[in-house]
Image (cartoon, rainbow, N blue to C red):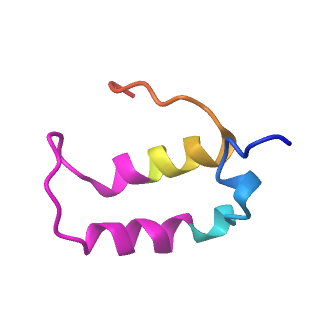
Amino acid sequence: MKNPLTLKEIGFNQNDVPAAVEDLLNIDFSNPAPVTKVGLTKMLNSAFEGRLLNRDS
């Protein structure tokens, strides 16, 4: 049995990235780095494809 490694493999639809980003931006949580729309979009798109996201990307 292979464990899923991407958002795609767990059934996440890439078209839902913008809505997920907006939902995440509305959550008040502590994070050491600034949480931005651009950063979250890059992170979710990378996770969808299973690509590692460079911290400076």
The residue that appears at 47% across and 45% down in the rendered structure is: 42
Quick check: 20 above or below 42? below
Is residue 3 rendered magenta in the image? no
- As drawn, is 21 to the left or to the right of 52? left
> For the N terminus, which image quadrant?
top right
Q: Nearer the viewer, residue 19 or 6?
A: 6
Please state the total of marks drawn on the protein image.
0
Q: Residue at x 33, y 24 (%)?
A: 56
Q: Residue at x 34, y 67 (%)?
A: 24
For the C terminus, the quadrant is top left
- The residue lying toward the viewer, choosing from 11 and 40, is 11
Residue 20 drawn at (x, y percent): 47, 69
Q: Residue furthest front?
A: 1
Q: Where 9 falls versus 22 (above or below)?
A: above
In which quadrant of the rendered view does residue 15 lie? bottom right
| In-image side of 15 versus 35 (left or right) | right
User: Percent position (x, y) of residue 14?
Assistant: 66, 61
Judged left or right of residue 22, residue 28 is left
As drawn, is 28 to the left or to the right of 9?
left
Q: Position of residue 44 (x, y in %)?
A: 51, 51
Residue at 73 percent across and 64 percent down: it is: 11
- Part of the protein shown in magenta: 17-40
Residue 31 painted magenta: yes
Q: Residue furthest right?
A: 1
Measured as percent of width and height from the top left, residue 28 is found at 16, 69
